[in-house]
Every structure is written in structure tokens, then in C-alpha cells.
Image (tube, grey):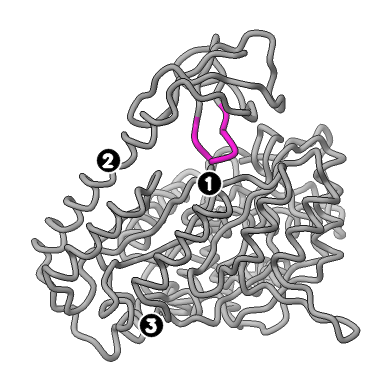
Amino acid sequence: MSVRREQPVKDNAGRTSRKLYIETYGCQMNVNDSEIVAAVMVQNGFELVEKPEMADLILVNTCSIRENAELRVRVRLRELGSLRKTNPDTRIGVIGCMAERLKEKLLEEDRSVDLVVGPDAYRDLPKLMWQVESGQKAVNVLLSEEETYADITPVRLDANKISAFVSIMRGCNNYCAYCVVPFTRGRERSRDPDTILREIEELASAGYREITLLGQNVDSYSWGKNGEVLTFSGLLARVASGFPEIRIRFSTSHPKDMGDDVLLTMAAYDNICKSIHLPVQSGSTRILSLMKRRYSREEYMQRIEAIRQILPDCSVSTDIIAGFCTETEEDHQQTLSLMQWVGYDYAFMFKYSERPGTFAARKYTDDVPEEIKIRRLNEIIALQSQLSYKSKQQDVDKIYEVLVEGRSRKSADEFVGRTSQNKVVVFPRGTSKPGDLVRVKIHGFTSATLLGNLI
């Protein structure tokens, strides 16, 4: 990731700009946070570079949602620490959710780490960096009930300049039994809609063609002013009507909060993409109750039925956890049957990973044997492969409007883009160019993409 500058930038002390490399793990929110961090640091005399070997400061933006995510970061930190053999002055910082969860413990466990900063303390990074440069370790993991970074214009790190993420809220109030997010990102707070619209206006002026509104639970967005409350459906309508030339996506929705008002708003505007990510986690009402998801299997199915009725051409994706505490074979079969009933277009599937500090870790026993978790996860993956195949098969001979993102990985003669339903399409480039909206007729598919021809 880099932002190139023709002339060196100098900080307030007159020094040539120091160089920063950011590496990001985890969700879309982390990607957006890295762009906020980049903006803060560029404003304070840092220049972004593409390789860690070029950097004076390396920041690793981390995820704590699963144990494997943290293990990947630990391995990467050891690799990055070895760079000090050739550049002893290189500083390494851990930011994001893993920093918030482990705090000072990270400094104790990894001597190569100089800096630990949580998701609500990014404004403090320049001051903390001065502390590090004076030879000290630095930590700020204070969570905020107000911070939204609404006044910071992110430095866009995506080179294609086609799509961008815009955060509309931070934090989460749901406290699902298995989830660490409320502990690493704090309480839920929504962002002033005027600042959201202003950021999108800047993106539109820069030529961006698609934005994704981000929140841990976008459906609970709520901004009050002068006795009036703007909900997510209202914000969505404002964005869609204000920027008809831009495609609008959003993520993530919660089944207990997604009302028909959001679906009706999606139906009312052509530029709101017809794609919904609606995590189910389990098809068993008993397990959902233990997970503290606050909806039943039947209530989830009612949401799917509403989507099918109001948005018949909408794609639906999901998250599924295999092997949660006390999950029986009957619970597992209920998950498989729900998947079959919904017919998800795609899914993110994982075996349960106990996270320290969560309700499940404190109150439940992680009692499903590892081999059973793996077997159940494999069955879920196998079923989803069938459902994804069927979904793609049904797309053959259909015509979709596709936003061109760039050349495909395999051929310079082909472009890749996405449909409104968030399905990837590869097609001959013809006279089209990145950023164009083109009509493509689907003639085939692979395991990962649809194949089409320009009309």
C-alpha cells in the first residue's frame, strides 16, 4: 500500500519525512481504519511506502475475531522483526483489535514490538511515535464512547480508485457470546450524516464509482438532531438519492435489526446494490439462544422471506460457525437444512474458536471435540459449494450490469468486475475501461467467477 509523493515531506522540525508501511489483516473495517491511520500519519510528516524494507515505521493492523487470525499476526511480527538486522532503527507497531485485546502483554511477549495502539487512539499515533523514538515503548488502548474519526479524510490505499469504504459507525452493543468485537472496538456510536455525505462527495469528485457503507451492525445506525432521528434506511436513501451515479453497498447487517424499511429503500433506488450479507451463525434456535444472537431460526427465515418478496433479484450471503459449545448432531443438521432452504450465494464458514474474555469463554465449556468441529465444518463447506454452483448455474444466459474494476489476473485481454449482486465476472475487455458500467451476458462459470461477454 502506498501513496507516492514527488517531493520529500518535512515535519514541523524540518526533518525529511519518515517512511511508513501499513499491513492490514481482517475485515473491511480494518481496511478503512488503515486509511484513517495513513491520513493521520501523512499529516504528521510520514510518507507511505509499498514494502516494509523501505519503512522507518511498520504498523500491523490486526484482527482478533479468531485465534488463527492472531497466530498469523504473531508469525508476521517475527518476520518483520528480522528486518532490524539490516535497519536497527526500524520501529514496529501493532494497532487494531489484537492490540486492544492484549494491550501491554504484546510488548512483553514480543520484544520487536515498540508500539501498541487500539482502534480509538489513532489520533495519538504521532505523539506516541515521538515517545518510541526517544527509546521508550508506547501504549494507548483507551476505548472511546465518542470517537468516529468523522473529521479525518482517509488516504485511500486501493490503487484502482474505483471503490472505497466509508465508515458510518463504530463499535457494537450486541455482545454475542462468542464475539470479542465489543471488547476491542467499544460501544456503538453513529457518525454525523453530514460528514458521511461530505466524504462521499469527495470520493465522487475524485472519480470513485462505488462506495460501501461500513459498520459492525449498520442496521442500528441512529443519529439524532433537533428532536429528529435518522435511521439507517433514511441514511441509505440520502446517499442513494444524493449520488445517483455511484453504486452503494453496505455491510454488515444483523438479522434482529434489518427491517423492511431497509429492504424497501433498496428496492426504491437502482444504484443500491442488490446484495445482503446476513450472518446466521447457526440454524438451531437453541444454539442461537446460547450465542445470544436474539433471533430464532424462524425469525431468520422470516427475514429471508422478506428479502425474497421485496428484492427477488437480491443475493444473500452469510457467516456460519461450526461446533459452538454444546452443539449436537441435531443442531448441526438444522444448520445444513437452513442453508439448503435459503440457498446462499456464498458464505464465510469457520469452526468455533473460543476467544478470551467473551461470555462463552467465561460461562460455557468448549466441549465439541476438534475432530467433530472439523468434520461438521467440512460438511458445511461441501454443501455451500453445491449451493454456490447452483447459484452460478442459474446466472447462465442472464444479462448483468457490471462495474469494471480492472484487468483479470490471468489475462491482459480480460477485465474483471462485479454485478449488483456482488458476483465476480470475467469478460473480454473490448473497448471498456476501469470504472465503466457495462452489460455482460453470462455464458459459463468457474468455481470462483462468472464468465461472460460484453453486449
Q: Specify the label residue 312 is tagged with.
A: 1
Spot occupied by residue 387 in the image (x, y as percentages of width and height): 30, 42
Location of residue 337 by image quarter: bottom left
In the rendered structure, the answer to whether residue 244 lies left or right of residue 351 reads: right
Depth order, front residue of 310/166: 310
Q: Which residues are magenta?
A: 417-424
Query: Which residue, given by chain and number where applicable, does mark 3 sit on?
Result: 292
The quadrant of the picture occupied by the C terminus is: top right
Q: Earlier in the sequence, mark 1 or mark 3?
A: 3
Name the residue type under label 1: Pro
Name the residue type under label 3: Lys
Crowd rating for badge 1 (residues with CA inside 10 Å; few <14, some 14–19, many 20+):
few
Name the residue type under label 2: Ser
Q: Specify the label residue 385 is tagged with.
A: 2
- Mark 2 and mark 3 residues within 8 Å of each other at the beta carbon: no
Q: How many marks?
A: 3
Taking the magenta stretch, the answer to whether it contains residue 421 is yes
Distance between mark 2 and mark 3 Cα atoms: 28 Å
Q: Is residue 66 above or below residue 81?
A: below
Taking the magenta stretch, the answer to whether it contains residue 200 is no
Depth order, front residue of 183/325: 325
Spot occupied by residue 418 in the image (x, y as percentages of width and height): 56, 33
Which numbered disc, 1 or 3, marks the residue closer to the eye? 1
